[in-house]
Image (tube, grey):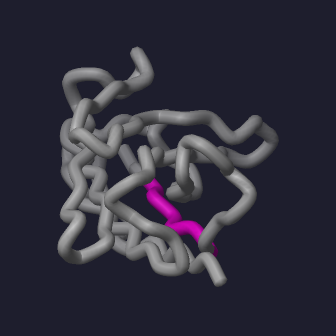
């Protein structure tokens, strides 16, 4: 079965940093493009960053220059380094494969305070 376990969220002040991790199992991790998504209350889930199997990254305009996605295929883990956090980054963060977003973990909450 597919399992995705997100971790690393928490409460942080604006301008601070967090590093999120997503540990995957049940997939051939190295063959899958991965993405980080977020969902704030009352809003639709949105893609904030993606990384291909070859390591090419892409970002939503709202996080470009502040977030960095990376992957460690040996650990079946994708990371999201979040710097210069803003209040509007507050959301539950999830990871999933780009090809099929049928499976989600429990998410990890990021709350940015002023």
Q: Main secondary structure of the magenta part?
A: strand
Where 4 sits versus 103, above or below? Answer: below
Residue, x 51% and y 57% (percent of image)? 95
- Magenta residues? 106-111
In the picture provided, is 99 more to the left or to the right than 19?
A: right
Q: Is residue 26 magenta?
A: no
Where 34 sits versus 50, above or below? Answer: below
Q: Which residue is nearer to you in this view: 83 or 32?
A: 32
Residue furthest out toward the top: 61
Residue, x 44% and y 74% (percent of image)? 24
The percent position of residue 87, horizontal first and vertical second, equals 44, 38
Residue, x 61% and y 77% (percent of image)? 2
Residue furthest out toward the right: 42
Residue, x 69% and y 41% (percent of image)? 45
The percent position of residue 59, horizontal first and vertical second, equals 37, 26
The image quadrant where one finds the N terminus is bottom right
Q: Which residue is nearer to you in this view: 89 or 71?
A: 71
The percent position of residue 49, horizontal first and vertical second, equals 40, 36
């Amino acid at each position: 079965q597919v399992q995705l376990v997100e971790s690393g969220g928490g409460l942080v002040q604006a301008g601070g940093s967090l590093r999120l991790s997503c540990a995957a199992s049940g997939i051939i991790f190295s063959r899958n493009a991965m993405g980080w998504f977020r969902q704030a209350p009352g809003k639709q889930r949105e893609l904030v960053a993606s990384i291909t199997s070859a390591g090419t990254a892409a970002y939503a305009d709202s996080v470009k220059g502040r977030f960095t996605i990376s992957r460690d295929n040996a650990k079946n883990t994708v990371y999201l380094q979040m710097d210069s956090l803003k209040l509007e980054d507050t959301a539950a963060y999830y990871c999933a494969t780009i090809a099929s977003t049928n499976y989600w973990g429990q998410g990890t909450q990021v709350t940015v305070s002023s």
